[in-house]
Image (cartoon, rainbow, N blue to C red):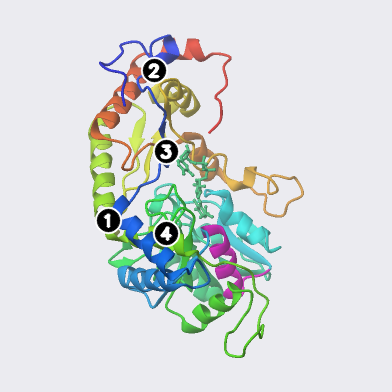
């Protein structure tokens, strides 16, 4: 993957890029090809492609077993799963959500004409701060949608106590946290429901996909109704509810089953990459690697995220993005600039707009680095070396970048 011995000149200063081909954040992890194809053979043999087919049903059973929850309903993607879960628990009016998340968390509410009310985050965990959320509660508030961002555990105890005091429901956006455990309990078992994304770029993928996990039977029944156009199934052709189409296909379930067969290997690959980053980045002034807290008793290690202290590093986070992009390392600024600065929430008249100082600071400092199966220890070492060179040559880099803008993240 690399172009050979370390180039002593950074590409941004005129040297040759360190990597011949782009190194992405979010390159999919893949299962064993033969294992996947055996599941595909079953689809061809059964001629059953979608609508709660045998593989989706088996996938659901395996998900429940893996997570230790009563229900984990496969859905066509994480965004629709968020829409279904928040609607099924009865959210309406205003819902408190962090701005420091992927836009789908907020859009899943706004799409249903609920108002996402953005709450600032805790500086350490980068997740919704329940103490600040309390001030945002109004008579219109019906729920909280906290996000285990980068798989970091939310303050579940604080959020649950807040919700109980105000009679609010909680749905967690657990898109990043599949396979994680908080204080011994699986992510998937908190709140009224938790929502996973199984998008291609996630730790665990089904091409596109997602799931709603819950221990509440009535809620699970409601989700099943809503995800299948409202067909209840008890009386032929009768529609019992306003529904949509949230079904997962058999091919996606095939991917999910094959991925579950190798999930421990993927976790281990990520863990080793994380350790390599830890060693390689140690001691670079102004670069701190976000480390999972001790309350996370199992971790998917999918997110390698650094914070860049521009004063100490000598370059801003965006300068570092430019340095790395020139080397073919496509680091990403997830989740810049924060939902509150994106359409439609950034519109002056939008009721969600408010001051979020921690979110503002964090979104200007964070950077996600490539990991997963397609990244090896040598790649990680090279990326760390490039970051160290950027620090050591920061004045020359600043001069070279003056006036240039980054291509976007
Ligand atoms: N909640 C949270 C907290 C989320 O992070 C997400 C999704 C959701 C909810 C919604 O779940 P889904 O409805 O998506 O299931 C990506 C993903 O599309 C999105 O799923 C994810 N979060 C978000 C954080 O990242 P983009 O627009 O940044 O993706 P894109 O196309 O730039 O791809 C990222 C990188 O991955 C690229 O550099 C190339 C690489 N890649 C991507 C794909 C799809 C590949 O190498 N192969 C591929 O097949 O949103």
**304 in the magenta segment:** no
Disc 1 designates what residue?
262
| Placement of 331 over or under 300, stated as above or below | above
- Mark 4–mark 1 Cα distance, whole angstroms, equals 27 Å
Instruction: Give the mark, 1 or 3, whose residue is nearer the N terminus.
Output: 3
Which label is found at residue 154?
A: 4
Label 4 or label 2, whichever lies nearer to me, is 2
Residue 142 screen position, x and y as percent: 62, 71
Q: Can you name the residue that lies furthest to the front here?
A: 45
- Mark 2–mark 1 Cα distance, whole angstroms, equals 34 Å
Instruction: Give the mark, 3 or 4, whose residue is nearer the N terminus.
Output: 3
- The answer to whether the beta carbon of the residue marked 4 is less than 8 Å from any atom of ligand 1 is no
**79 in the magenta segment:** yes
Which label is found at residue 17?
A: 2
The picture quadrant where one finds residue 304 is top left
| Placement of 219 over or under 135, stated as above or below | below
- The answer to whether the beta carbon of the residue marked 3 is less than 8 Å from any atom of ligand 1 is yes
Tag 2: Cα neighbours inside 10 Å, few (<14), some, or many (≥20)? many
Disc 3 designates what residue?
25
| Placement of 376 over or under 301, stated as above or below | above
Tag 3: Cα neighbours inside 10 Å, few (<14), some, or many (≥20)? many
Which contiguous range is marked in magenta? 78-92
Residue at horizontal 52%, vertical 75%? 165
């Amino acid at each position: 993957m690399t172009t050979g011995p370390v180039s002593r000149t950074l590409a941004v200063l005129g040297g040759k890029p360190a990597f011949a081909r782009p190194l992405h954040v979010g390159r999919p992890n893949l299962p064993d090809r033969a294992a996947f194809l055996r599941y595909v053979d079953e689809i061809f043999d059964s001629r059953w492609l979608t609508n709660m087919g045998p593989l989706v049903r088996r996938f659901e059973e395996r998900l429940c077993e893996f997570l230790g929850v009563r229900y984990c309903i496969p859905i066509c993607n994480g965004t629709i799963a968020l829409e279904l879960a928040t609607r099924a628990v009865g959210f309406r009016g205003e819902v408190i959500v962090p701005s420091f998340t992927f836009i789908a968390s907020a859009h899943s509410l706004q799409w249903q004409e609920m108002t996402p009310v953005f709450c600032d985050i805790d500086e350490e965990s980068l997740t919704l701060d329940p103490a600040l959320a309390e001030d945002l509660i109004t008579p219109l508030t019906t729920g909280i949608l906290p996000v285990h961002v980068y798989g970091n555990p939310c303050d579940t105890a604080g959020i649950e106590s807040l919700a109980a005091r105000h009679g609010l429901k909680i749905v967690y956006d657990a898109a990043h946290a599949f396979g994680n455990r908080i204080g011994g309990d699986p992510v998937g078992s908190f709140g009224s429901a938790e929502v996973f994304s199984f998008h291609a770029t996630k730790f665990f993928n089904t091409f596109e996909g997602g799931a709603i996990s819950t221990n509440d039977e009535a809620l699970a029944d409601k989700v099943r109704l809503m995800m299948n156009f409202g067909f209840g199934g008890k009386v032929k052709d009768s529609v019992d509810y306003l529904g949509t189409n949230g079904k997962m296909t058999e091919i996606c379930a095939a991917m999910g089953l094959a991925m579950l067969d190798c999930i421990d290997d993927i976790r281990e690959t990520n863990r080793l990459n994380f350790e390599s980053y830890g060693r390689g980045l140690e001691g670079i002034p102004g670069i701190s690697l976000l480390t999972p807290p001790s309350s996370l008793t199992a971790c998917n290690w999918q997110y390698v995220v650094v914070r860049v202290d521009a004063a100490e590093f000598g370059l801003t986070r965006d300068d570092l993005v430019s340095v790395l992009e020139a080397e073919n390392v496509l680091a990403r600024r997830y989740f810049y600039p924060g939902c509150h600065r994106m359409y439609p929430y950034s519109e002056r008249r939008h009721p969600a707009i408010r001051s979020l100082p921690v979110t503002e600071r964090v979104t200007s400092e964070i950077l996600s680095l490539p990991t997963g199966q397609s990244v090896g220890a040598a790649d990680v070492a090279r990326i760390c070396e490039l970051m160290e060179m950027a620090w050591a040559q920061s004045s020359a880099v600043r001069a070279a970048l003056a006036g240039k803008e980054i291509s976007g993240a």
